[in-house]
Amino acid sequence: MPGPLLAVRNLTKLYPARRSLFGRPQGSVRAVDGVTFDIAAGETLALVGESGCGKTTTGRAILRLVEPTAGDVWFDGMDVRALERESLRQLRRHLQIVFQDPHASLDPRMRAGRIVREGMEVHGIAEGAAADARVARLLEEVGLRAADASRYPHEFSGGQRQRIAIARALAVEPRFIVLDEAVSALDVTVQAQVLALLLELQRSRGLTYLFIAHNLAVVERVATRVAVMYLGRIVEIADAARLYASPKHPYTQALLSAVPVPDPAARRQRIVLSGEVPSPSAPPPGCVFHPRCPHPAKDAECTRTVPPLREVAPGQLAACIKTNVES
C-alpha cells in the first residue's frame, strides 16, 4: 500500500504566554499539543472543534506559515520542516491554503485577474498571453466570468471573493489544499454552492484537502475522515460515516448532539457540557477534557493519566481511557 500524501507526527506549537520585566517569556500557550494524523492522496480529512482549539494553527504549522515548535511534517516523503527557504518556496506550489475571510485575504488594490495570475508568475508557470488565458479558464472553472478579471475584490460578493481565493490556490496546480473555515463566513445557500465546487474540483483535479471547520453539519457533506480537536489535542479520529453513526469520545458525542437535524425523531439527546474550556496556557492534568466530561465512569484516574489515541473500533481511534474497545 502506498504511504500517505501527508503525514503529521507529534506536531506542537507553543506561544509565549507572557513576558517578564526584562522581556523574557514566562510560561507558554500550548496551541497545538502533539497532533498526529495521516491524509491519503485524494481524501478529505476534516479537522473540527470549538473556536480556539488549535485547528487553524495546525493547518498553518503544516504549511510553515507559522513555525512548529516540535514534531514532524512529511509531504509525499519530503521532510517539510527540514527544508531551507528556497526549497520550501518551491514546495509551496504543491501546498496551498484558502483562508476563512476572503475580504481580508485578497489585496484590495489588485484586480481579480492579477490576484490569480501572481502565483503563476512567481513559480514560472505562465506569463503574458498564456497567463491571461489560464486566468480566464480558472475564473470560469470556479464559476466566475473571464471578464471578471478586471474587477476589484470589493466589487464582488463574499461568495464570489471566496471563488477568487480558490482560483488563486488552483493557479499553481497544487496537490494539497488547507481549507481554513473556507465557507464559515458565507450564508447557507452560498456555502452549499462553494462546497459543491470544492467537491467537483477534488474529483476533476485529484486534490487532497485538510478541511478545517467548526460546523459538523457542513463537514458531513465533504469529509472522508474526521479528526476532532479539543484544547490542542486530537481526541477522536475515524471515517466520517462511522464517527457520525457511533461517536466514541464524550466530547465528540456532545458536539454531535448539538447538530440540528431535519427529523426531530432522529435527533440525539442533547448533551450539555458544564464549565468553560480551560486555558491552553494552564491545561488540566491528565485528560484535558476531564473537568467537563459527562462520562458516567469518570474517576480520579482521568485526572492523572493522559489518554493516548487508541483503536476502540475498527478504524476509529479515541483518546479516552473509559471508552470500551469493541471486538
Image: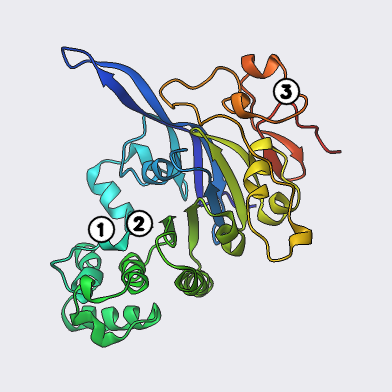
For residue 23, side relative to residue 40 (left or right):
left
| Image mark count | 3
Local secondary structure at mark 2: loop
- N-terminal of the two: label 3 or label 1? 1
Q: Mark 2 near mark 3, Cβ–Cβ under 8 Å?
A: no
Of residue 171 and residue 185, the one placed in the foreground of this image is 185
Instruction: Name the residue type under label 3.
Output: Lys
In what quadrant of the picture does the C terminus appear? Answer: top right
Q: Is residue 47 above or below residue 176?
A: above
Q: Nearer the viewer, residue 51 or 199?
A: 51
In 3D space, how far apart are the residues under numbered discs 3 and 1 (Cα atoms)? 44 Å
- For image coordinates 68% across by 37% down, the residue present is 249
Label 1 crowding class (10 Å Cα cut-off): few <14, some 14-19, many 20+? Answer: few
**Percent position (x, y) of residue 308?**
64, 27
* Relative image position of residue 294 (x, y in whole percent): 69, 31
Q: Which amino acid does the dot numbered 1 rest on?
A: Ala
Q: Residue furthest left?
A: 109
At which x and y percent is residue 92? 32, 54
Q: Secondary structure at mark 1?
A: helix
Residue 207 in the image: state x and y as whole percent. 48, 64
Q: Which residue is mark 3?
A: 298
Judge from the rendering whether residue 326 lies leftward or rightward of residue 131; answer left or right: right
What residue sits right under mark 1 in the picture?
A: 104
Q: Which mark is residue 99?
A: 2
Report the front residue among 130 and 211.
211
Residue occupying image coordinates x 43% and y 61%: 175
